[in-house]
Amino acid sequence: MPTLAPAARTEGNAQLPVARTVADLRARVAAWRREGQTVALVPTMGALHEGHLTLVRQAKERAGRVVASLFVNPTQFAPHEDFDRYPRDEAGDAAKLASAGCDLLYAPSVGEMYPEGFATSIAVGGPSEGLCGAFRPHMFGGVAVVVTKLFLQALPDVALFGEKDYQQLMVIRRFTRDLDIPVQVVGVPTVREPDGLALSSRNAYLTADERARAPELNRALAEAAAALTAGAEAAEVIERAQARIAAAGFGNIDYVELRDAESLEPVARVERPARLLAAAWLGKARLIDNLPVAAG
Ligand code: PAF
């Protein structure tokens, strides 16, 4: 029967223990299992905000114990991207997680996750094609590897992800199903600022002026989603949305697209549940957002 890792290998404080190794994580989860507890996992890259804490609170409602992982995953960033400057504040994150009722923080090192000689990749297709997959081609393969590892390390009953990264959620659902990983993947609606801006760790990159313009992305999508539900043709609606986003001062608009809500295949008209997704640059921040579009 597995035993708990020695106390010296577990850091943290009375409020929130921290596991740094796979062995420590597994021992803690095994101890919970012996008590008959169910386990939820909330994978994160830290810089936590209310969106992440909502995931933790919802995880608490679905399982007896909640593990949040904090790992800025190098394999999902291209060399020119923001891996080095991605905001990091482990102590602050730990305090937030404790206050949201999290039971364990799993914060492995890069060496623990990708030991010397690591040579495995996962090729994802289907919902990873197009959208962010076209602009960040390395990303979903990296997400698939790290999330699969986290699933196999923690062996949770359920794992929760924000719908703000809707394409990521669909990719994770697909490879979890395709690889028969026995984890229930749950999507949680996007948490927004009062002005509609989707919460994101990358909002920290916005200047005050950009922050004031940023909610236009959500407003343009909301207007477009209403028009699509009313039966308008996607191409024309999307053109209007792009013009509105550009007029708000965004730079490159990577995409505004209408996709099937489940398969993420492109659709021209809303006949079954669809999703309107967008990514656009505002200064140094690449903002993404999406909204459901119901068939009218
Ligand atoms: O959404 C994120 O924060 C990351 O992509 C995830 C799922 C934690 C994998 O690194």
Image (tube, rainbow, N blue to C red):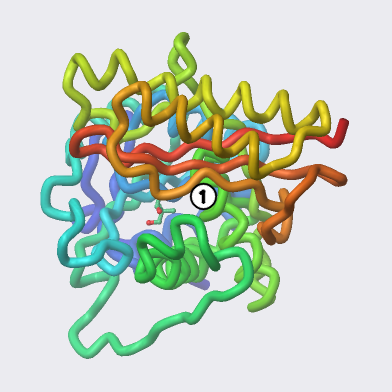
- In the displayed image of the protein, which residue is found farthest to the left? 84
For mark 1, what is the residue? 41
Quadrant in the rendering for residue 113 = bottom left
Q: Secondary structure at mark 1?
A: strand
| Outermost residue, top side | 194
Kind of residue at badge 1 = Leu
| Percent position of residue 149, x then y | 44, 70
Quadrant housing the C terminus? top right
Q: Residue at x 23, y 80 (%)?
A: 115
Q: Nearer the viewer, residue 40 or 263?
A: 263
Q: Residue at x 17, y 22 (%)?
A: 207
User: Could you tell me if residue 195 is visible in this image?
Assistant: yes
Does 293 sit left or right of 254 as displayed?
A: right
- Choose between 70 and 4: the one closer to the eye: 70
Tell me which residue sits at (34%, 62%) in the image: 24
- Looking at the rendered structure, the number of numbered marks drawn on it comes to 1
Q: Residue at x 87, y 45 (%)?
A: 271
Q: Nearer the viewer, residue 156 or 45?
A: 45
- Can residue 17 be seen here? The reply is no
User: Does the numbered disc 1 mark a residue whose Cβ is under 8 Å from ligand 1?
Assistant: no
In the rendered view, tell whether residue 18 sits above or below residue 80. above
Q: Nearer the viewer, residue 14 or 249?
A: 249
Quadrant assignment, res 26: bottom left
* Residue 198 x %, y %: 45, 27
Within 10 Å of disc 1 (Cα), the crowding (few <14, some 14-19, many 20+) is: many
The vertical placement of 129 against 250, above or below, is below
The x and y percentages for residue 44 are 38, 46
